[in-house]
Image: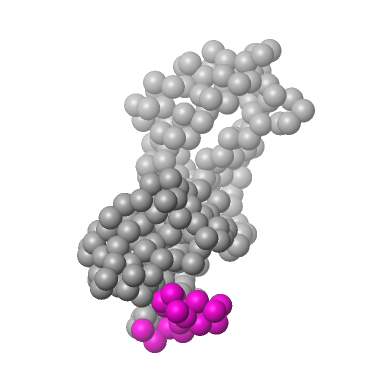
Amino acid sequence: MTAVARHVRIRAKPGGGEALRRGLLEVADALGDAAGCELYVVNRMSHEPDVIWVTEQWQSQEALDAALASEAARERIPGLRELVADGGIERIDLEPVGGVGYPVGETGCAIVNLDEVEDMAPRFGLGDTGEARFARARLQAQGVGLSLQRVRPGVRSSFGHWHSRDEEIYVVLAGSGRIAVDDAVHEIKRLDAIRVAPASVRAFEAGPEGLEILATGTHHAGDAHMHPGFWPD
């Protein structure tokens, strides 16, 4: 199965660039769960707002063809074509060969006991708050992060954090407490799973039994941003 990619340059009818941009972003949303779609990015030329570039990458030509033949595509394509200037579509077909962010099908596994991963909290002067054991490097994981977080009884996180791109899910393994997400505070207990969107600031507070959390999510280097002293109430 050979991956395929393409750059498509689309010129809208005069003044139609914004409508075309919105329509193509709707297409991107619809492709979020499409089988084989690895990348679909809508770009606009800063000095020519009526010119839109779409960058696509698919696991195979068959996956691309299936997406184009889908009901969602059949519903949207005619309306988008109405926005395009005559002769306004140029396409460059490509074969991906590698690079940053390019998915490669590897084999193998790694097994790590999380209690044997170094606790990073003392290194940053946060040992009184709890433990933070980040396992991604030990697991040799490339695109996903995993950590074991323990917050001591009655203690609140020293800081909140947020991301530009990384979506995270937290699972409460033991104890109970609260999670603050932006302006809201939620009670959490054992086996609760909490998904937090990238740009939402989040922090934890442990109950009387403490709080043990497994945190996982996508990983992009340098994507974490700290928010010292964050708590909304």
Does residue 205 appear left or right of residue 4 in this picture?
A: left
**Residue farthest right in this picture:** 47
In this rendered view, identify the residue nearer to me: 104 or 167. 167
Q: Is residue 51 above or below residue 54?
A: above
Residue that appears at 53% across and 25% down: 22
Taking the spot 39% from the left edge, 36% from the top edge, the residue there is: 66
- For the N terminus, the image quarter is bottom left
Quarter location, residue 204? bottom left
Q: At which x and y percent is residue 188?
A: 27, 58
Residue 159 in the image: x percent, y percent? 50, 63
Q: Nearer the viewer, residue 72 or 156?
A: 156
Query: For residue 37, which quarter of the picture?
Result: top left
**In the image, residue 127 lies at what x, y percent?**
47, 80
Magenta range: 115-132
Residue at the outermost front position? 233
**Residue 143 visible in the picture:** no
Q: Is residue 49 above or below residue 168?
A: above
Residue occupying image coordinates x 41% and y 66%: 156
Residue 130 highlighted magenta (yes or no): yes
Horizontal and vertical percent position of residue 101: 57, 57
Can you say whether 145 is above or below 108 in the image?
A: above
Taking the image as drawn, is residue 225 in sight? yes
- Does residue 59 appear to the left or right of 210 in the view shown? right
